[in-house]
Amino acid sequence: MTQDELKKLVGIESAKYVKNGDIVGLGTGSTAYFMVEELGRRMKEEGLEITGVTTSNATTKQATELGIPLKSIDEVSHVDILIDGADEISSDFQGTKGGGAALLFEKIVASYANEIIWIVDESKMVEKLGAFPLPIEVIRYGCEQLFHLFDKKGYQPTFRINNEEKLVTDDGNYIIDLHIPTINNPIEFAKELDTYVGVVEHGLFTNMVNRVIVGSEHGVKTIEVR
Ligand code: 5RP
């Protein structure tokens, strides 16, 4: 099976957890894409009724094209279920997200979700986080100072680039990726990152996920985390 086929498999499986009337957080990325497509199909063919809360402009565009009714996070009282991808998931189910530069809205929606499902192919399951660069969303003002600070600390920062310019997120910020081979204690490191002025949000999603759906050659495995 190709990686895309695995992504489609977990996307479709995760959509089964969505019930009629749910307010659904719609994640971002190439795996979440298949989940959103499946919800669109269920609405059309099964009469499923949901309200979507999107986590990026890209997902808003896709959901709108599928006819999924949308509300912003400020227009809903809560989110019943959020389904999203991830870049890495450690053996104790901490996650790195933001490979698609949508970590800020993803984390905001995650904060108000009653249930969070991550959908990944097995290449994302790791012992410890770190091989995937850790995205940090930063305010533009003072971003070079922050970059130097990360550099001095040995975090090997690089600005995320798009079309030879610094990539601008949906909220108008930049992304600095940190290249730290092993993040031994994501919870402590998340606390440290929260202390830097100018950091809007970081890609460590700690103690958040309830269920992980993993796709592999052997099929789909669902792991109940908490
Ligand atoms: C976007 C994200 C994505 O969920 C993450 O990058 C996984 O994406 P993909 O399913 O395309 O590998 O965090 O900011």
Image (cartoon, rainbow, N blue to C red):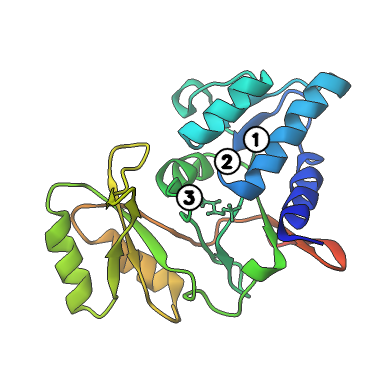
* Label 3, label 2: how far apart the Cα atoms are: 20 Å
| SS assignment at label 2 | loop
Above or below — where is 182 with respect to 85? below
Q: Which mark is residue 100?
A: 3
Q: Is residue 224 left or right of residue 55?
A: right
Residue farthest to the front, as pictured: 163
Q: Is residue 26 left or right of residue 171?
A: right
Of the pair 152 and 93, the residue shown nearer to us: 152
Residue 84 is situated, as x and y percent measured from the top left of the image, at 61, 47
* Label 1, label 2: how far apart the Cα atoms are: 6 Å
Q: Residues within 10 Å of mark 2 (few under 14, many from 20)?
A: some
Does residue 200 appear in the picture of this structure?
yes
| Residue annotated with mark 2 | 113
Mark 3 is on which residue type? Gly
| SS assignment at label 3 | loop
| Residue annotated with mark 1 | 80
Q: Residues within 10 Å of mark 1 (few under 14, many from 20)?
A: some
* Label 1, label 3: how far apart the Cα atoms are: 23 Å
Nearer to us of marks 1 and 3 is 3
User: Are the residues tagged 3 and 2 within 8 Å (C-beta)?
Assistant: no
Mark 1 is on which residue type? Asp
CB of mark 3 near ligand 1 (< 8 Å) = yes
Asked where in the image residue 211 lies, by quadrant, the reply is bottom right
| Chain-order first, disc 1 or disc 3 | 1
Residue at 87% from the left image edge and 22% from the top image edge: 45
Mark 2 is on which residue type? Ala
Residue at 44% from the left image edge and 78% from the top image edge: 183
Q: Which mark is residue 200?
A: none
| Chain-order first, disc 1 or disc 2 | 1
